[in-house]
Image: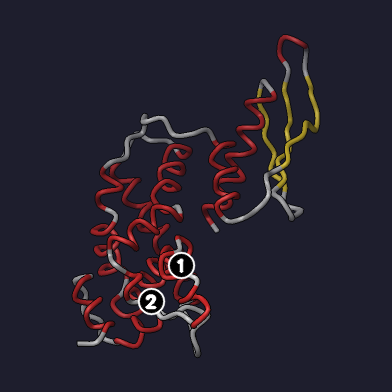
Amino acid sequence: MSSVEHLARTLELEFNDQELLELALTHKSYQGDNYERLEFLGDAILDLVVSEKLYMRFPNANEGQLSRMRSEVVKKTTLADIGRKLSLKDHVRLGEGELKSGGFNRDSILADLVESIIGALYLDQGLAATGSFIERIFEQKISSLTVDQGYKDPKSLLQEQLQESGGALPEYWIKSVSGAQHDQQFTVICRLPDTDVEFVGLDSSRRKAEQSAAASALASLTDN
């Protein structure tokens, strides 16, 4: 039994096109085509399926709460943990340099593998089968979520997400303050590092306006 066949059995999947699964396990350091396009597709499908599951599971949650829960489910560390549980490190195809440096156990690669396998399964069997697979491997994480379990505020979450991807910290500044002293309205700008992309937050205090701007920036990153 080949490594790919063994993994398919471990994942309880039967691919019609085994080459799709092989491609999903092929890092860019390896010769030939790699999983990056499948990872791109799998990332979008994962967001869609998880969003639907959370929408149905938490009927009273608002948009911000749903976004924070989705971020918790699809973040790289969660995906890497799932990749380890599925023993993906034993099946990834790496170039010699990545292999020697321990790339098979790196969070970023393990997370990419989860998404690329999702993308491959979608192309092979469609959304229904892919949704069932996602629900199965993310069941424990999703079932542990509660709306009121004390997620971090948007500024903290935005900072963590940017640091996780190796980026610099966002910048905040007050654009304007209007209204009487007892009824002020703060307009705060949040700019993502190394970009010209800005997000606006309006609220009755600088802190709240910063959180509002950060929430918009976080939602933008989650949707991409």
Q: Can you give x and y, in whole percent of width and height, for residue 25 in the image?
A: 39, 78
Q: Which mark is residue 109?
A: 1
Answer yes or no: do the residues labelled 1 and 2 have beta carbons within 8 Å?
yes
Could you say which quadrant of the image residue 205 lies in?
A: top right
Circle nearer the N terminus (1, 2): 2
Q: Can you give x and y, in whole percent of width and height, for residue 191 in the image?
A: 72, 45
Q: Can you give x and y, in whole percent of width and height, for residue 34 in the image?
A: 48, 82
Amino acid type shown at disc 1: Ile
Q: Residues within 10 Å of mark 2 (few under 14, many from 20)?
A: many
Amino acid type shown at disc 2: Val
Element carrying mark 1 = helix
Q: Which mark is residue 92?
A: 2
Going 60% across and 50% down the picture, which residue do you hit? 162
Q: Can you give x and y, in whole percent of width and height, for residue 22 in the image?
A: 36, 84
Could you say which quadrant of the image residue 216 lies in?
A: top right
Element carrying mark 2 = loop
Going 61% across and 32% down the picture, which residue do you hit? 211
